[in-house]
Image: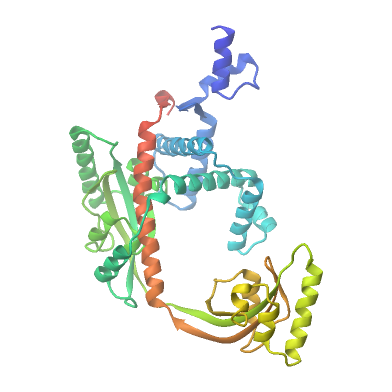
């Protein structure tokens, strides 16, 4: 093999930093070629070990190693294809965005960033690896948003149809805990391939109804993205699940296995793991509020804006009319002409510092100047009430759930097409 050929191989393997004599060793370590990139044996083994730990922790049956390696490799291939596509599309996440996302995760777990990092390390997780996985997840979600999200539309009629057919607002909804197995079909599958997949699905249903473990079967046989979780789809209401499943789950009792359900992706088998009720009543807090805003600019720095706001509060407390002062002094021109009124606002509608200050105020109370990104505010709460928002809340839930369902269905087809159309060479003798 000539020197030029050696260099080409080294480039393919990402091995230019290694001496030429190590190239054969690197080539031997390749488990799959994915377009113009590779997956190495040590990368696969690391992922397999992680999944084995999760399965052991969940006390689920461990699938055969060959099956687990195949499932993990397929997931790695699809992930790599998505990252390659994202790179071509110019999608990138900088360190500031990544650290902000990590901080949000820590906050949702009621921890500081440092506490969260220590907790991960205590559980044996490398923080740098966590950040890399988080970065990949954000990039892939951004890619899917571009490729799929823009094509998904939910009409008012679809929302109305659901509400008409699935029950009135306020009724108790049922939640379903589902297991799922997908016997996949490639795009444009032949009649022979379809028949073969259906026969396999029928045989699996027969075995599952006879007592074969569903979790292990999903890990071994399913082509769905949840296969390594034993096919567990989690808790869902009817509006949260694929359209194909809706008509079937109502017929199933706990523990039942469905007949194979055909979709463009293949044949689906679902198991009813559990059922429970959900009360859907919902109320919101609405606040009638007004404010005076003093903005900073080239002539008014932060200290001067704060000083002006404090003087205005002193005048209000001395008896000057709030609305008159707002009309004459507020830099929020939209509300100034209405005496500073923002009218009725819902929780979550305003920026956080403003809302936090507003929430603490009693009726008719005047706040101290409050700083937001817009400047300095003086806030007065005029009224506050709880309103039954069940109808609107339900519509928004239904709209979002229909959108989520459509995205899931479209994503499944998109990923299958991405995998089918890509150049992938798996070293079969190493799996």
Q: Residue at x 60, y 54 (%)?
A: 101
Q: Quick one: 47 or 356, which is closer to the camera?
A: 356
Q: Which quarter of the picture shows residue 348?
A: bottom right
Q: Quick one: 66 or 101, which is closer to the camera?
A: 101
Q: Residue at x 79, y 65 (%)?
A: 299
Q: What x and y, as percent, mark residue 131?
A: 61, 46
Q: Residue at x 37, y 76 (%)?
A: 391
Q: Which quarter of the picture shows residue 273?
A: bottom left
Q: Residue at x 25, y 70 (%)?
A: 164
Q: Quick one: 202 or 212, which is closer to the camera?
A: 202
Q: Is residue 297 above or below residue 311?
A: above
Q: Is residue 311 above or below residue 90?
A: below
- Considering every residue shown, the one lying at the far bottom of the view is 319
Q: What x and y, as percent, mark residue 266?
A: 27, 43
Q: Which quarter of the picture shows residue 428?
A: top left
Q: Judge left or right: residue 11 versus residue 231.
A: right
Q: Quick one: 430 or 21, which is closer to the camera?
A: 21
Q: Quadrant of the N terminus?
A: top right
Q: Judge left or right: residue 305 versus residue 17.
A: right
- According to the image, what is the colour scheme of the structure? rainbow
Q: What x and y, as percent, mark residue 328?
A: 69, 80
Residue 416 appearing in the image: yes
Q: Quadrant of the C terminus?
A: top left
Q: Judge left or right: residue 340 versus residue 223.
A: right
Q: What x and y, as percent, mark residue 135?
A: 57, 45
Labels in figure, total = 0
Residue 224 appearing in the image: no
């Amino acid at each position: 093999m000539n020197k030029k050929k050696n260099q080409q191989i080294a480039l393919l393997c990402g091995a230019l930093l290694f001496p030429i004599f190590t190239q054969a060793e690197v080539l031997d370590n390749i488990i799959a070629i994915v377009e113009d990139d590779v997956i190495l044996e040590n990368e696969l083994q690391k992922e397999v070990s992680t999944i084995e730990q999760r399965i052991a922790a969940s006390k689920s049956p461990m699938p055969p190693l060959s099956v687990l390696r195949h499932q993990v490799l397929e997931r790695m291939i699809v992930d790599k294809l998505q990252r390659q596509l994202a790179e071509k599309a110019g999608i990138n996440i900088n360190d500031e965005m990544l650290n902000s996302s990590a901080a949000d995760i820590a906050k949702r777990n009621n921890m500081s960033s440092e506490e969260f990092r220590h907790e991960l390390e205590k559980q044996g997780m490398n923080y740098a690896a966590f950040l890399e996985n988080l970065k990949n997840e954000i990039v892939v979600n951004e890619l899917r948003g571009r490729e799929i999200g823009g094509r998904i539309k939910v009409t008012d009629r679809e929302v109305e149809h659901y509400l008409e057919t699935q029950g009135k607002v306020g009724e108790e909804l049922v939640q379903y805990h589902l297991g799922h197995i997908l016997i996949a079909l490639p795009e444009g599958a032949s009649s022979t391939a379809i028949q073969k997949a259906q026969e396999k699905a029928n045989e699996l249903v027969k075995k599952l109804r006879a007592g074969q473990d569903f979790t292990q079967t999903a890990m071994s046989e399913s082509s769905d993205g949840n296969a390594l979780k034993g096919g567990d789809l989690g808790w869902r209401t009817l509006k949260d699940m694929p359209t194909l499943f809706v008509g079937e789950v109502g017929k199933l009792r706990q523990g039942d296995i469905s007949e194979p359900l055909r979709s463009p992706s293949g044949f689906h088998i679902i198991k009813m793991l559990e059922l429970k009720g959900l009360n859907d009543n919902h109320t919101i807090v609405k606040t009638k509020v007004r404010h005076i805003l003093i903005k900073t600019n080239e002539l008014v720095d932060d200290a001067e804006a704060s000083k002006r706001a404090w003087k205005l509060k002193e005048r209000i407390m001395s008896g000057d009319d709030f609305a008159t002062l707002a009309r004459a002094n507020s830099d929020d021109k939209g509300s100034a002409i209405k005496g500073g009124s923002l009218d009725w606002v819902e929780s979550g509608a305003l920026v956080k510092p403003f809302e936090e200050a507003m929430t603490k105020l009693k009726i008719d109370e005047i706040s101290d100047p409050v700083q937001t990104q817009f400047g300095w505010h003086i806030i007065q709460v005029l009224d506050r009430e709880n309103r039954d928002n069940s109808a609107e809340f339900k519509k928004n839930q239904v709209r979002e759930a229909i959108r989520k369902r459509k995205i899931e269905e479209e994503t499944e087809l998109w990923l299958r097409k991405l995998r089918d159309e890509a150049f992938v060479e798996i070293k079969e003798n190493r799996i």
